[in-house]
Image (cartoon, rainbow, N blue to C red):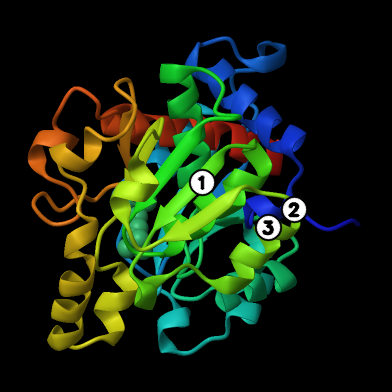
Amino acid sequence: MGEPRHFLDLDRFDTSTLRGMLKIGLAYKRRQPPDGNAKPLAGKTLAMIFEKPSTRTRVSFEVAVRQLGGDAIMLTDTSTQLGRGESVADTARVLSRYVDAILLRTTSQARLLEMARHATVPVINGLTDSTHPCQVMADVMTYEEHRGPIGGKIVAWSGDGNNMAGTWIQAAARFDFDLRLACPDQLTPRPEILNWARGEGARISITDDPLKAVTGADCVVTDTWVSMDNESDSPRSSREKRHNLLAPFRVDARLMSSAKPDAVFMHCLPAHRGEEVTADVIDGKQSIVWDEAENRLHAQKGILTWCMA
Ligand code: CP
Ligand code: NVA
């Protein structure tokens, strides 16, 4: 038996496989199921393990699986023996005997990789400290629905070099857009992800000047100043420190006006109005965040079908 069809990170796929998933997701969105098969997951079950909170990932995966004819079981670390110290490896081995795929949102990339190493069914990355690939698949789908092919476009990131930034970097290599990151020196993205992407020929620049990154961009992206990982392991003073470091990277109307006139604003949500983005931007005409949230459902149908059907 070959390796299960895991969906761990964008760097593991070639462009055409990722494009294939998006195409399937869009086909379901348009109610034109590939091969006329509306229920490719009939009889299949997805276990969803959340070691951190979630609204979008949890609900969109559960709804996607059900609409494709399958079933989803929601598990939290505290409601399972994982919370009492049973290993990820043993959990992977056992769940693989019951279900057809495992979605994991976890505190560390190492736990995701351990799950994948020991599972004999596909494992899907529902967010780690390092990446969030399901979100960026939806983001690419959303950008392209609004503005056409993302290849050759300029995407600007202003904020923390966090897990979302990590996957945008991988996406720059796979979807061939220019990525300009503006991050404080203390909060730059993981060097191993950057090095990988540059090795793939991705066009990525980093600055600590948001105006430089955003000027002339086609798409402006940001994310929270305090990710779930930062909450669990840092005292209040560290939260304040992050706010101070990141305040100059807030996406406000002035910064947004330096992008192209038809630039879009994206944010994976949850958002904090007045922190990483002002209300006039996220609730304004250039914001496409609600379509972005909706497309989690559609993009994930492509991912689920590729992994499980
Ligand atoms: N964007 C995102 O993954 O949201 P949730 O944390 O609500 O799943
Ligand atoms: N960077 C955020 C993304 C939430 C979807 C976090 O990890 O909390």
Q: Would residue 190 be found to the left or right of residue 58 on screen?
A: right
Q: Nearer the viewer, residue 287 or 102?
A: 287
Q: Position of residue 175 (x, y in %)?
A: 63, 37
Q: Which mark is residue 198?
A: 3
304 to 201, vertically: above or below: above
Q: Nearer the viewer, residue 291 or 5?
A: 291
- Identify the residue at image location x=44%, y=27%: 143
Instruction: Tell me which amino acid carries mark 3.
Output: Arg
Q: Nearer the viewer, residue 77 or 70?
A: 77
Crowding around mark 2 (Cα neighbors within 10 Å: few <14, some 14 to 19, many 20+) is some
Q: Which residue is mark 1?
A: 179
Q: Position of residue 112 (x, y in %)?
A: 58, 70
Quarter occupied by the N terminus: bottom right
Q: Nearer the viewer, residue 53 or 273?
A: 273
Q: Which mark is residue 200?
A: 2
Residue that extends furthest to the right in the rendered view of this protein: 1
Q: Mark 3–mark 2 contact, CB under 8 Å?
A: yes
Choose the circle earlier in sequence order: 3 or 1.
Answer: 1
Identify the secondary structure beneath mark 3.
helix
Identify the secondary structure beneath mark 2.
loop
Q: Which mark is residue 204?
A: none
Instruction: Tell me which amino acid carries mark 1.
Output: Leu
Identify the secondary structure beneath mark 1.
strand
